[in-house]
Image (spheres, rainbow, N blue to C red):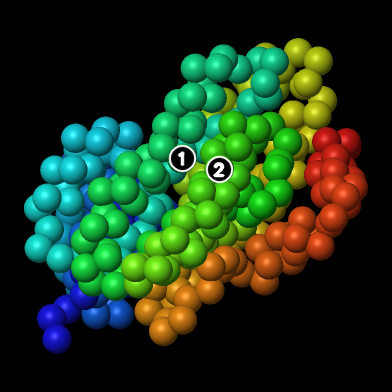
């Protein structure tokens, strides 16, 4: 039987990079995609250090033509890992609708573009779709309104798609990391500027940033998150919903057991006071 092929999006850093290397170590032929392949240096170095190789290709998840071109270059596809995404911090009154649309384009419509293009090949191989969402796709988090909205949308879409895809032999899974020690927090940038521009929301935003920075100080590593993703990729019967750590499981459990929403709002509201 030929080596199985997995396409992974967003592999230039963080979870995507670690997942590409871990999947290659598990025997997969890894098509590691990113919008800008000039940023592949860290991935290629990590793969070389691990004694594996990956097939780096350009793919912009927000561009259907780019997605189609990338998929057309594959002979087969056994699994897709939707990992590409972008964070966003801000609250409704102070961001533009265009900002929110941009977040949705990457985190929601990007997932749809790639999954739609991949499904015919995955039906042929009886393959699987894994989409990296977030605990923010289960619990809405202060100042992450656009990001959480996109991740909620992905979770709802995939939860609805899963039984339909299963009728054709394709399994669908969402993977929910919690805090992961990657570039997410450093990409926030300009924290003091953000607070200074927050107006009436400045005290709450300052408290949120302090709390979140501490959470990421104790985060799991990208390699640990990748191990959970590869386990879901290789198990015979993948669950629909997978968390990558005990902390993520405890966090999401708050929502899944909270029928009236009061526990979640009490939980997240406490983040905004010092």
* Depicted 186 relative to depicted 178: above or below: above
One can see residue 92 in this view: yes
Q: Of residues 227 and 241, which is closer to you in this image?
A: 241
254 vs 8, left or right, is right
Q: Which residue is mark 1?
A: 108
**Image position, residue 137 (x, y; %):** 61, 49
Q: Residue at x 75, y 60 (%)?
A: 256
What separation in Å lies between label 1 and label 2 (alpha carbons)? Answer: 7 Å
34 vs 260, left or right, is left
Neighbor class of circle 1 (other Cα within 10 Å; few <14, some 14-19, many 20+) is: many
**Image position, residue 18 (x, y; %):** 37, 63
**Quadrant location of residue 209?**
top right
Dot 1: element: helix
Instruction: Tell me, for residue 24, which label it has, or none.
Output: none
* Depicted 160 relative to depicted 199: above or below: below
Q: Which residue is mark 2?
A: 153
Q: Residue at x 54, y 57 (%)?
A: 159
**Quadrant location of residue 176?**
bottom right
Dot 2: element: helix
Please report whichever mark, 1 or 2, sits nearer to the chain's N-terminal start: 1
* Depicted 203 relative to depicted 81: above or below: above
Q: Of residues 155 and 91, which is closer to you in this image?
A: 155
**Image position, residue 174 (x, y; %):** 51, 60
Q: Residue at x 75, y 30 (%)?
A: 206
CB contact under 8 Å: marks 1 and 2: yes
Q: Of residues 272 and 129, which is closer to you in this image?
A: 129
């Amino acid at each position: 039987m030929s080596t199985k092929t997995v396409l992974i999006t967003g592999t230039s850093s963080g979870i995507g990079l670690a997942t590409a290397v871990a999947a290659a170590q598990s025997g997969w032929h890894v098509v590691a995609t990113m919008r800008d392949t000039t940023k592949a240096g860290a991935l290629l170095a990590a793969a070389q250090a691990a004694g594996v190789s990956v097939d780096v290709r350009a793919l912009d998840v927000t561009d259907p033509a780019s997605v189609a071109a990338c998929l057309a270059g594959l002979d087969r596809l056994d699994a897709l890992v939707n990992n590409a995404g972008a964070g966003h911090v801000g609250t409704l009154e102070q961001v533009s609708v265009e900002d929110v649309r941009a977040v949705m384009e990457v985190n929601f419509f990007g997932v749809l573009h790639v999954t739609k293009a991949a499904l015919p090949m995955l039906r042929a191989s009886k393959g699987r779709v894994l989409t990296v969402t977030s605990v923010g796709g289960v619990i809405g988090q202060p100042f992450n309104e656009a990001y959480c909205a996109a991740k909620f949308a992905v979770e709802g879409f995939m939860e609805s798609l899963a039984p339909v895809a299963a009728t054709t032999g394709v399994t669908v899974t969402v993977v929910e990391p919690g805090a992961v020690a990657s570039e997410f927090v450093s990409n926030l940038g300009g924290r003091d500027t953000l607070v200074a521009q927050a107006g009436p929301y400045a005290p709450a935003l300052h408290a949120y940033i302090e709390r979140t920075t501490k959470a990421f100080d104790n985060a799991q590593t990208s390699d640990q998150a990748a191990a959970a993703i590869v386990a879901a990729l290789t198990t015979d019967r993948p669950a629909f919903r997978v968390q990558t750590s005990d902390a993520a499981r405890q966090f999401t459990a708050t929502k899944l057991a909270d029928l009236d929403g009061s526990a979640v709002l009490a939980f997240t509201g406490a983040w905004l006071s010092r």
